[in-house]
Every structure is written in C-alpha cells, then in structure tokens.
Image (cartoon, helix red, strand yellow):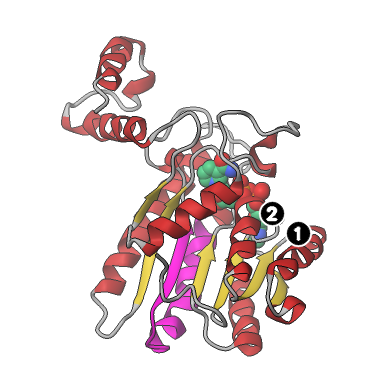
Amino acid sequence: MSHPALSPDHTAVVTGGASGIGLAAARRFAALGMNVCIADVDEARLRSAAAQVAAEARRGEAAVMTATVDVSSRDSVAALEQAARQRFGAIDVLMNNAGIQPGSRMLAETNWQRILGVNLWGIIHGSQVFAANMIAQGKPALIINTGSKQGITTPPGDPAYNVSKAGVKAFTEALQHELRNTPGCRVTAHLFIPGFVFTPLTANGRVEKPAAAWTPEQTVDFMLERVAAGDFYVLCPDNDVPRALDERRILWAASDIVENRPPLSRWHADYADAFAEFVKKLP
Ligand code: NAI
C-alpha cells in the first residue's frame, strides 16, 4: 500500500534531513524514485547525506538537492520553499522534522528560546510557508510533522522539549482540521510520533543501538505504512514499548484532568500503585 504523493518523480522536502530519522526518510523517498530536497542547518552532515541519498536515487545526484536552512527563521524557510520549487517544481511531501534536545530546566532560561525556535516554530514556519502552494497544486500531498510522546505524556526532566512538542501536536491537529475544511484541498497533515529511535540525538556517546530502540529505517517504514493507511496520529512503538502500553500511558495522562488528580500523577508517589494497576490492565 502506498500514498499517491509518494510516487516516482514527485518531490519531498525533509527538514533535519541530514541525520537520523530525517536522513532515513530522505533515503526512502529517493528509493521510491522521488526527488528529494534535504534541508538542514549542519553543512558537514548535508554533504555526507547528499551522497547517501543520491546512492538510493534512480537518477542519482540529479534527483537530490541540499539546502542550508535554519528552520527557526521564517526567511530561511521561505528561501527553502523557493529553492526547492525552482529546482523540482511542485512539492508533494513536506516533512517538518528538524529537532533538537539540548536539555532544559524549569526555572532556568537556558535553551528555552532555541528549543521552541527549532522544534515548534520550525514546524509552524514550514507548514505556513509551504501549505498555500501545496494546496494550489490541486493534487494529493502530505505535510508530516515530527512530534514526540513527550509532547503527549509530558514526563518530568526536559520541560522545554515537552512544551515544544505539545505545541507541535496542537498545531498539527489544528492544521489538519483547517486542511480538511478547505474546499478542493487535497493536502493532509500527519503527526508523526516516534518511539525511542537510535540517532545522534539519543546516542549520548553510545555507538551501538540499545536493545530498546528502533532504527531510523524501521521507524520511517512504519511511518510510511501508517500514512498510506490514512492515519493522522502515527504512533510508533519501539522494542520496549508496544502500542498497548502507549495507549495506557496516554489515557492515564488525559485522565489526570477528568479524575481531578495532580498533574503528572504518573510520577507522583501517591499514585504509583494506582498507575501500576492501571498499566496492568493492558488489553
Ligand atoms: P538527529 O539529531 O539525528 O537529527 C536532527 C537533524 O535536525 C540534525 O541533522 C540537525 O542538524 C537538524 N537541525 C537541528 N537544528 C536545526 C535547524 N535549526 N534547522 C534545520 N535543521 C536543524 O535527531 P533525530 O533523532 O533524527 O530527530 C528527528 C526528529 O525526531 C526531531 O524532531 C526529534 O525531536 C524527533 N524525535 C526523535 C526521537 C528519537 O528517539 N530519536 C523520539 C521522538 C521524537
């Protein structure tokens, strides 16, 4: 099963496409016979990624372009849109995937602006800058925004990252609502929610994939399958967390409000037993 946007000679733009999940996606798009624009802020990574993506492409280097882009800057994203369109014409797939996780603390300003700038403003800029022309093309097209489970269950430890990814979720849900209510629009938005994926972002000095993690390629293959099936929420498992466990965690988090519990009760000592019992009731 595939999606009509994912067809030979169509074009994909992938931000954060020079590493990890974005690079795996760029390689898959190239292998499908698509033109690929790899957009990233890291020029050294871009050079190596271009060769890897071209190696997968039927037309080799002719099907690949790179763009040095900082997604936190709207001007930079606007220049990307123009450059990709000038080189390849219509854009069929936009994957807003660039992200950083340098760490943050609740009561210190450090990294907050940068994390929100890249992770949240990056996907807002990408979606807003690309969507009008993608809609006007009049053919099926995809906007895939990379979120995180941390934007849904918001675990303690990295509040700025959680806030950015919660924003990605809210923005992408509203984007899809807007697109489906726009007459004649054949563009759909999707919230891509990876599990634990072994990439430079999560490596922390490790060179071997931890058993719990999926590879970027596994994750992208799952994403392509679920997008083709029409899913909006592409909730990826990993080797430690099956979908059923994610479902319990998500339900528990949402139930904090319904049950009038304290926030993040999953990590509150008074609720430890109740949460453990709840999780045991896996279907
Ligand atoms: P990665 O670090 O391997 O790749 C991210 C890429 O984004 C890098 O090439 C980096 O240079 C680029 N980038 C950073 N700032 C940028 C900017 N301002 N403009 C353009 N490009 C920029 O990371 P990974 O793991 O592949 O992450 C991709 C996305 O997946 C991120 O949004 C991340 O938050 C998300 N994610 C990753 C998970 C994991 O376990 N690896 C889990 C859940 C979400």
On screen, residue 238 above or below 16: above
Judging by the rendered image, the residue that carries numbered circle 1 is 42
Kind of residue at disc 2: Ser
Q: Is residue 256 left or right of residue 137?
A: left
Picture coordinates of residue 129 (x, y %)?
A: 50, 76
Kind of residue at disc 1: Asp
On screen, residue 62 above or below 242: below
Q: Determine the secondary structure under disc 2.
A: loop
- Disc sitting over residue 19 in the figure: 2
Viewer-nearest residue: 145 or 52: 52
Viewer-nearest residue: 155 or 206: 206
Picture coordinates of residue 173 (x, y %)?
A: 32, 59
Residue at image coords 50%, 77%: 7
The answer to whether the residue bearing label 1 lies less than 8 angstroms from the nearest atom of ligand 1 is yes
The answer to whether the residue bearing label 2 lies less than 8 angstroms from the nearest atom of ligand 1 is yes
Would you say the magenta stretch is mainly helix, strand or loop? helix
Magenta-tinted stretch = 120-145
For label 1, the crowd category at 10 Å Cα-Cα, with few meaning under 14, some 14 to 19 and many 20 or more, is some
Q: Nearer the viewer, mark 1 or mark 2?
A: 2
Quarter of the image where the C terminus is located: top left
Based on the picture, tell me whether residue 207 belongs to the magenta stretch.
Answer: no
